[in-house]
Image (cartoon, rainbow, N blue to C red):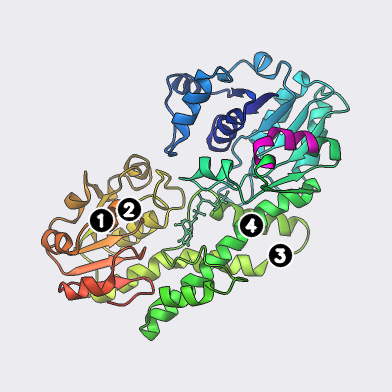
């Protein structure tokens, strides 16, 4: 099939590369010439394992290319994915769909009567119908169809998630458009993956409800972890005991410093706004956001209590990304921890294997940046693990003891054995685990 993907950002690029790997001819369009030039040199503008390799494989096969030329990008395209960004409006947490609107206006005159436009971006309920209206107002043929096909990609494993999804949701008004879209995903149909055909509005809500559910589930286990700390028991045992109930499930029950990243914070706020626009509210999600926002300072309180205050204390901070395997620092709880430490007078030296450059844009010179985990911790009064990079879990307890000048190891990601920490003569501070 001939496919055009509008947007070479995270969602657009992953979609374009993976769909081309299904055997289709894909043209990936972006108006940002610098970005396209970098991509043409094989440079992926964000850290996503496996994406660059899959991109060059499909370029070499001659079925994937980048362009800034809209005429060329859309010529003969049967399917047009809109995969542009939908950031959160910082003033009120609502969803900014300006890029989607602009994309719809731009592509409208180039569409053919058989074209199907697919919303891949995460957009509020009603957007597919609104996009259709914009297309028609801007010269698209009457018969053009608009389908909602949300993505459920996790950063750091987006390629795997795309090629091996739990489900593919297609929100379409007509069976014909839904069937055509299934042809785009034909290898996944053959492999027996679940396809769910719904109304466009239901597909749009499924995306927000999924992320909000994950946010609530995680916030629940985080509250249980904080309770476990008060009781003095191991929250991982509790999480295991809960998760073995198949109705609850084992996944997404790792206590930590809270949810961050580009999606969960944005989509939980987005859901509140969607509810508001329908004259109702989702109080559970509202509360989860509030609880989540407070977790970094609660964890820093624990550290402060153990160190009799943080003024002038040297803290080696391991991790700045919002989770392991990504360079993304948006709404990162590790950044919130750094800010909270600085606010209380601590001297922070941080290391992250991938995220330092992006973190510097937020934290500037309020903290120091180290070149390695050892450099961050060396001579510090306490080491704090804020992101679960595998390499942090590979530092031995004796190395921590040797490098630290103080005696505190705080692991807010549960990647270190707390008993081994106390056995080695260090004091352990955790998130639901006891030394
Ligand atoms: C999420 C959804 O998982 C994905 O389906 C959607 O398309 C985009 O949003 P992502 O933002 O990449 O993906 O992150 P995810 O791996 O879900 O983690 C979100 C946050 O929760 C991170 O801060 C992570 O560290 C935290 N988390 C997740 C935990 O602390 N414990 C867990 O058990 C799971």
Q: Please give the range of residues in magenta.
A: 179-189
Within 10 Å of disc 3 (Cα), the crowding (few <14, some 14-19, many 20+) is: some
Q: Nearer the viewer, mark 3 or mark 4?
A: 4
Q: Earlier in the sequence, mark 2 or mark 4?
A: 4
Q: On the image, numbered disc 2 is attached to which residue?
A: 390
Question: In whole angstroms, how far apart are the C-alphas of marks 3 and 4?
Answer: 17 Å
| Residue 70 screen position, x and y as percent | 65, 17
Q: Earlier in the sequence, mark 3 or mark 4?
A: 4
Q: Is residue 72 above or below residue 255?
A: above
| Residue 319 screen position, x and y as percent | 32, 53
Question: Is residue 183 located in the magenta-colored stretch of the structure?
Answer: yes
Q: Earlier in the sequence, mark 3 or mark 1?
A: 3
Question: In whole angstroms, how far apart are the C-alphas of marks 2 and 4?
Answer: 27 Å
Question: In whole angstroms, how far apart are the C-alphas of marks 3 and 1?
Answer: 44 Å
SS under mark 2: helix
Q: Disc 2, disc 1: CB below 8 Å? A: yes
SS under mark 4: helix
Q: Quadrant of the N terminus?
A: top right
Q: Say left or right for 207 vs 68.
A: right
Question: In whole angstroms, how far apart are the C-alphas of marks 4 and 1?
Answer: 33 Å
Question: In whole angstroms, how far apart are the C-alphas of marks 2 and 1?
Answer: 7 Å
Q: Quadrant of residue 84?
A: top right
Q: On the image, numbered disc 4 is attached to which residue?
A: 210
Question: In whole angstroms, how far apart are the C-alphas of marks 3 and 2?
Answer: 39 Å
The yes-or-no answer for disc 4 within 8 Å of ligand 1 is yes
Q: On the image, numbered disc 1 is attached to which residue?
A: 394
Q: Earlier in the sequence, mark 4 or mark 1?
A: 4
| Residue appearing at x 77%, y 19% in the figure | 109
């Amino acid at each position: 099939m001939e496919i055009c993907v509008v947007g070479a950002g995270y969602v657009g690029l992953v979609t374009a590369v993976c769909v081309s790997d299904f055997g289709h001819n894909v043209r990936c369009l972006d108006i940002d010439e610098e970005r396209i030039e970098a991509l043409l040199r094989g440079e992926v503008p964000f850290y996503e394992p496996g994406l660059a390799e899959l991109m060059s494989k499909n370029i070499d096969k001659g079925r994937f290319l980048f362009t800034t030329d809209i005429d060329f990008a859309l010529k003969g395209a049967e399917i047009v994915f809109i995969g542009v960004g939908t950031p959160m409006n910082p003033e009120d947490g609502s969803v900014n769909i300006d890029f989607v609107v602009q994309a719809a206006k731009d592509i409208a005159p180039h569409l053919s009567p058989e074209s199907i436009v697919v919303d891949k971006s995460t957009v509020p309920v009603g957007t597919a119908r609104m996009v259709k209206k914009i297309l028609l107002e801007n010269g698209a043929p009457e018969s053009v169809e608009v389908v909602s096909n949300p993505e459920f990609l996790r950063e750091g494993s987006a390629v795997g998630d795309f090629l091996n999804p739990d489900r593919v949701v297609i929100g379409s008004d007509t069976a014909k458009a839904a069937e055509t879209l299934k042809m785009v995903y034909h290898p996944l149909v053959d492999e027996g993956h679940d396809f769910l055909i719904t109304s466009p509005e239901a597909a749009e809500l499924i995306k927000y409800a999924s992320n909000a559910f994950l946010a609530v589930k995680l916030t629940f286990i985080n509250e249980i972890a904080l309770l476990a700390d008060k009781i003095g028991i191991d929250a991982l045992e509790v999480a295991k005991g809960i998760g073995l109930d198949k109705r609850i499930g084992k996944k997404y029950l790792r206590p930590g410093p809270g949810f961050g990243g580009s999606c969960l914070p944005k989509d939980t706020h987005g859901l509140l706004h969607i509810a508001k626009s329908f004259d109702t509210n989702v109080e559970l999600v509202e509360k989860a956001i509030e609880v989540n926002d407070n977790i970094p300072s609660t964890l820093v309180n624990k550290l402060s209590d153990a160190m009799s205050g943080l003024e002038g204390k040297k803290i080696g901070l391991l991790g700045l990304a919002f989770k392991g395997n990504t360079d993304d620092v948006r709404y990162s709880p590790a950044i919130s921890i750094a800010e909270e430490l600085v606010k209380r007078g601590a001297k922070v030296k941080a290391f992250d294997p991938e995220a330092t450059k992006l973190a510097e844009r937020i934290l500037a010179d309020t903290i120091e940046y180290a070149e390695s985990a050892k450099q961050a911790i060396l001579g510090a009064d306490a080491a704090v693990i804020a992101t679960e990079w595998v390499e942090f879990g590979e530092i031995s307890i004796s190395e921590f003891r040797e490098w630290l000048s103080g005696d505190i190891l705080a692991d807010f990601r549960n990647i270190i054995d707390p008993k081994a920490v106390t056995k080695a003569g260090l004091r352990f501070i955790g998130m639901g685990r006891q030394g």
